[in-house]
C-alpha cells in the first residue's frame, strides 16, 4: 500500500514538473505558453530592471543619498542635479512602490544606504497594491529580495510571478518608451494639459500606513540620516482642504514621534503652474529642476542630510 502511494506521489510530481517545463519552453507565435495562460505575469524589464542593474555598480560614499518611493520618486529626483552639488544620488523608486515594499528594499540595501530621502504622498500611504509587488518580484537583483517582496503581498498573481522568475518564464516584452537616465531616474518632458476639478474625500490610512512608522523607526535605530519629502502636486481648493484637514493630521501623528527627522513638504507650496508638471501627479523636467534645487537649498541650510 505504501509503495503504491509513493509511486502515485512520484508520478504526480513528475507530471507537475513536466507541466511547468512545457509552459516555460513551448512557444506559439514566438510567445511561451505561460503568457497565454497567465496574462498577469509582469514582464522583466523597464525602469525597474534598469534601476536594479545600476544598483549593482553603484558605489556609495559618505555623502551619497538614496531615494525610495513610488513613481513620484523615480520621476522626481534627478541624480544630475544632485551631482552638481557634489552629491551621488541613487533613485530606488519604482512604479506603484508601496511603503511595505519600500521598507523591504531599505533593509535589503542597508549596507549601501547612509543617507535617505523617503518620498511620500497620500496615495502611497493607503492600501497595498499588486503593481509594486509584481514589478519588484520580476526585476529584483536577487532571489532573496524577490522572496521578501513576495511575503509582503501573497496573492495568486504574486505566486505566479515568483514561479515565472524561478523557472525563467519570459512573457511578451515589457512596453517601455520612457527616457531613462541613470541610477533609477526617468525624465519627463511633456507639459500638463488638463484640469484638476476632482473632489477628494477624507484620507483613510490603509494597510500601507503603519510602514511609515516602521521605516522611520528602522532608520533611527540604524543611524541612517533621513528626511521625508513630498514633491509638488497640482492642487485645487478641494485638494487643499483634503490635504490640510484630513491627510496632514494623520501623517503628523507619526512624524511627532521622530522630531529628529525633517519633513520637506512642497506638495502645495509651489506656483501650481501647469508648465512644471507632466500630469497632475508627476513633475516634468522643468518641475524637477525647480523642486530639486529648492530641496537641496533646504537640506543645505538645515544640515539635515549633507
Image: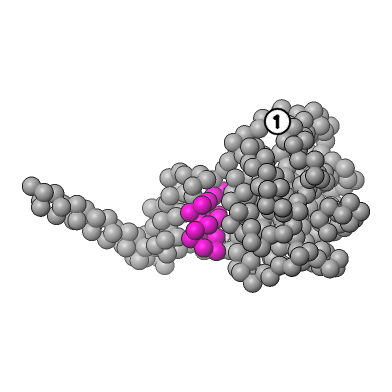
First to last magenta residue range: 131-149
Q: Is residue 24 left or right of residue 299?
A: left
Query: Residue at the spot x=83%, y=59% of the render?
Result: 306
Q: Nearer the viewer, residue 210 or 61?
A: 61
Residue where numbered disc 1 is placed: 203
Confirm whether the magenta stretch covers residue 7.
no
Which residue is situated farthest in the left direction here? 1
Crowding at label 1, few (<14), some or many (≥20) Cα neighbours within 10 Å?
A: some
Q: Which of 235 and 161 is in front in this view?
A: 161
Q: Is residue 109 left or right of residue 224?
A: left
Whether 248 is drawn above or below 13: the answer is: above
Q: Is residue 216 left or right of residue 85?
A: left
- Give the SS element for disc 1: loop
Q: In this view, does 193 lie to the left or right of 92?
A: right
Which of the 4 image quadrants contains residue 180?
bottom right
The image position of residue 192, as x and y in percent, is 79, 50
Query: Residue at the spot x=43%, y=45% of the render?
Result: 156
Which of the 4 image quadrants contains residue 75?
bottom right
Confirm whether the magenta stretch covers residue 135.
yes
Whether 256 is drawn above or below 62: the answer is: above
The image position of residue 92, as x and y in percent, is 67, 58
Whether 26 is drawn above or below 136: the answer is: below
Number of numbered tags placed on the structure image: 1
Amino acid at each position: 500500500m505504501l509503495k503504491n502511494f509513493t509511486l502515485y506521489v512520484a508520478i504526480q510530481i513528475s507530471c507537475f514538473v513536466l507541466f511547468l517545463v512545457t509552459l516555460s519552453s513551448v512557444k506559439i507565435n514566438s510567445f511561451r505558453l505561460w503568457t497565454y495562460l497567465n496574462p498577469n505575469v509582469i514582464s522583466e524589464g523597464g525602469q525597474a530592471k534598469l534601476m536594479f542593474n545600476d544598483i549593482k555598480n553603484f558605489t556609495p560614499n559618505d555623502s551619497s543619498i538614496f531615494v525610495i518611493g513610488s513613481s513620484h520618486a523615480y520621476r522626481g529626483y534627478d541624480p544630475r542635479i544632485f551631482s552638481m552639488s557634489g552629491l551621488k544620488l541613487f533613485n530606488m523608486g519604482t512604479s506603484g512602490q508601496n511603503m511595505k515594499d519600500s521598507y523591504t528594499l531599505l533593509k535589503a540595501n542597508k549596507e549601501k544606504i547612509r543617507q535617505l530621502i523617503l518620498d511620500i504622498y497620500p496615495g502611497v500611504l493607503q492600501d497595498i497594491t499588486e503593481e509594486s509587488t509584481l514589478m519588484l518580484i520580476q526585476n529584483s537583483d536577487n532571489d532573496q529580495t524577490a522572496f521578501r517582496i513576495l511575503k509582503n503581498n501573497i496573492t495568486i498573481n504574486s505566486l505566479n510571478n515568483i514561479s515565472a522568475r524561478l523557472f525563467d518564464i519570459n512573457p511578451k516584452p515589457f512596453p517601455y518608451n520612457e527616457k531613462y537616465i541613470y541610477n533609477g531616474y526617468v525624465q519627463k518632458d511633456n507639459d500638463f494639459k488638463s484640469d484638476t476639478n476632482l473632489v477628494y474625500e477624507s484620507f483613510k490610512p490603509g494597510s500601507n500606513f503603519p510602514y511609515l512608522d516602521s521605516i522611520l523607526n528602522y532608520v533611527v535605530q540604524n543611524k541612517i540620516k533621513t528626511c521625508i519629502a513630498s514633491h509638488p502636486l497640482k492642487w485645487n481648493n478641494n485638494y487643499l482642504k483634503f490635504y490640510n484637514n484630513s491627510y496632514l493630521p494623520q501623517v503628523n501623528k507619526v512624524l511627532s514621534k521622530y522630531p529628529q527627522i525633517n519633513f520637506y513638504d512642497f506638495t502645495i507650496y509651489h506656483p501650481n503652474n501647469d508648465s512644471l508638471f507632466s500630469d497632475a501627479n508627476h513633475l516634468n523636467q522643468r518641475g524637477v529642476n525647480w523642486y530639486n534645487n529648492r530641496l537641496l537649498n533646504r537640506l543645505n541650510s538645515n544640515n539635515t542630510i549633507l
